[in-house]
């Protein structure tokens, strides 16, 4: 058994100062230790996949050798499969995973861990994530971290430490202020009732976004599907990244980048289907989102890139959700001028949100990006001066 400080301080010496995850009793000592050190950062994510995406965003903007750790119970590993296989693997965004081993064969545990325990190693192997058991002796910590870093630096992909029961001694969380929360804002609806055929197109909306996101100070992260493809077709700029998978993860990904890089204005271009898939991210952004994060949702009421199947977005006030979750401002409209107003407004004490209802449809012959995901990531990191 080791002390939380022994691992966290060894990790800090190697550049790990960002943590995100979903609690597990095995992880409690780490979380309590990190929360009480103002020089370290911990984000409590709504689910494990969001935590992986968030640390991916931190990695994207990392400077001076900074690194991130995602922590989760193995029962939540399934929630993380999509971003692990289509975000971190595809874009080569390395991170250290600490996965607790509930239901480890031979160790008594609760019935819900009876299947996940035995298959956890196989899941990691299938996702091509090298792993080893978490170090339980102080002298083993440094070598384990060094092996993880060597793999991460060589491949650009995650490495996992699988934590067995009793690996870390308890660490008390002292009582204190949980942190101020933003006062609720009133969501603003500005619908004009224009006919569906007269709504703005995605092309119109993206051109407005481009006009308001200068190269030198802004990063634009586009959701998977036609959003990223059409942004690429309009103007392929070095301050843009086009998600090609991990549906719904653009917002926690953007949050990680915005937290790590307060010098940049980070714009997350979301879609209604993606937002509905991971609505827990609204709460995380509302709680942790900084003023340099802008969340734009282009809502055409359909899964456009998979055949135009309808979503349930017409039933949802996304601005109401954003306001209730703690965004500093939230507005929804069918008038594209809402985007001009969003970007031209003065900075606020927290993230901004706008939902623009657009018409369905995509231009014929829409190209796919010819730049590969690792190359678009590397280009963006160079552009923003990241490692």
Image: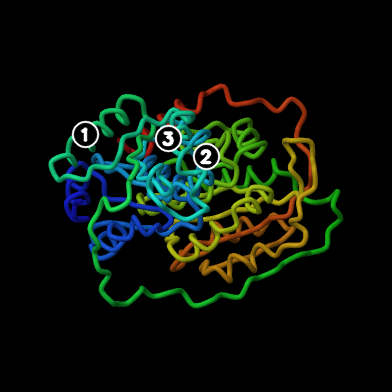
In the depicted structure, whether residue 63 falls above or below residue 258: above
Instruction: Find disc 2 in the rendering and name its residue.
Output: 81
Residue 255 located left or right of residue 63: right
- In space, the residues marked 1 and 3 are separated at their CA atoms by 21 Å
Other residues around mark 2 within 10 Å, as few (<14) / some (14–19) / many (≥20): some
Camera-nearest label, 3 or 2: 3
Tell whether label 3 touches label 1 (CB within 8 Å).
no
Q: Which residue lies furthest to the top in this view?
A: 370
Question: Of label 3 and label 2, which has the lower sequence position?
Answer: 2
Relative side of 363 to 279, left or right: right
Q: Which of 103 and 32 is in front in this view?
A: 103
Q: Where is residue 86 in the image (x, y as percent from the top left)?
A: 53, 34
Q: Which residue is drawn at 38% across and 44% down?
A: 106
Q: Mark 3 points at which residue?
A: 121
Q: Residue at x 73, y 54 (%)?
A: 357
The answer to whether marks 3 and 2 mark residues whose Cβ atoms lie closer than 8 Å is no
Q: What element carries label 3?
A: helix
Q: Of helix, strand and loop, which one carries label 2?
A: helix
The residues tagged by marks 2 and 1 sit, at their Cα atoms, a distance apart of 25 Å
Q: Which residue is drawn at 70% across and 43% down?
A: 202
* Mark drawn on residue 146: 1
Residue 45 lies, in percent from the top left, at: 46, 57
> x, y percentage for residue 210?
57, 43
In the rendered image of this protein, does residue 125 appear above or below residue 227? above
Mark 1 / mark 3, whichever is N-terminal = 3
The secondary structure type at the circle numbered 1 is helix
| Residue 257 visible in rendering | no
In which quadrant is the C terminus drawn? top left
Left or right of 122 in this view: 357: right
Figure disc tally? 3
Residue 215 vertical placement versus 292 (above, below): above
| Rendered residue at 27%/43% (across/down) | 66
């Amino acid at each position: 058994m080791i002390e939380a400080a022994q691992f966290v301080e060894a990790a800090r010496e190697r550049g790990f100062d960002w943590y995100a995850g979903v609690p597990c009793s095995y992880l409690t000592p780490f979380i309590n230790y990190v929360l009480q050190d103002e020089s370290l950062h911990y984000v409590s994510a709504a689910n494990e996949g969001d935590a992986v995406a968030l640390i991916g965003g931190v990695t994207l903007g990392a400077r001076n050798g900074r690194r991130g750790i995602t922590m989760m119970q193995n029962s939540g590993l399934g929630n993380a499969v999509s971003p692990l296989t289509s975000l971190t693997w595809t874009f080569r965004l390395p991170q250290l995973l600490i996965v607790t081993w509930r239901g480890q064969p031979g160790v008594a545990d609760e019935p819900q861990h009876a299947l996940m325990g035995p298959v956890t190693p196989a899941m990691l192997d299938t996702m091509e994530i090298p792993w080893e058991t978490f170090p339980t002796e102080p002298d083993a910590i440094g070598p384990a971290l060094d092996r993880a870093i060597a793999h991460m630096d060589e491949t650009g992909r995650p490495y996992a430490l699988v934590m067995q029961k009793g690996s870390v001694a308890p660490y008390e969380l002292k009582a204190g202020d949980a942190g101020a929360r933003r006062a609720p804002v009133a969501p603003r609806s500005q619908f004009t009732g224009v006919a569906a055929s007269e709504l703005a197109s995605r092309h119109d909306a993206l051109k407005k976004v481009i006009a308001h996101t200068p190269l030198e100070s802004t990063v634009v992260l586009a959701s998977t599907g036609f959003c990223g493809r059409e942004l690429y077709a309009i103007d392929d700029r070095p301050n843009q990244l086009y998600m090609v998978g991990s549906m719904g993860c653009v917002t926690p990904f953007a949050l990680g980048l915005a937290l790590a890089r307060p010098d940049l204005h980070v714009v997350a271009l979301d879609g209604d289907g993606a937002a509905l898939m991971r609505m827990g991210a609204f709460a995380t952004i509302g709680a942790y989102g900084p003023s340099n994060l802008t969340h734009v949702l282009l809502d055409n009421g359909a899964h456009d890139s998979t055949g135009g199947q309808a979503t349930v977005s017409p039933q949802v006030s996304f601005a109401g959700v954003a306001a209730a979750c703690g965004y500093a401002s939230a507005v929804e409209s069918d008038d594209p001028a809402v985007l001009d107003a969003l970007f031209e407004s003065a900075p606020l004490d927290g993230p901004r949100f706008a939902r623009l209802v657009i018409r369905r449809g995509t231009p014929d012959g829409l190209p796919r990006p010819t730049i590969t995901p690792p190359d678009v990531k590397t280009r963006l990191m160079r552009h923003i001066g990241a490692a």
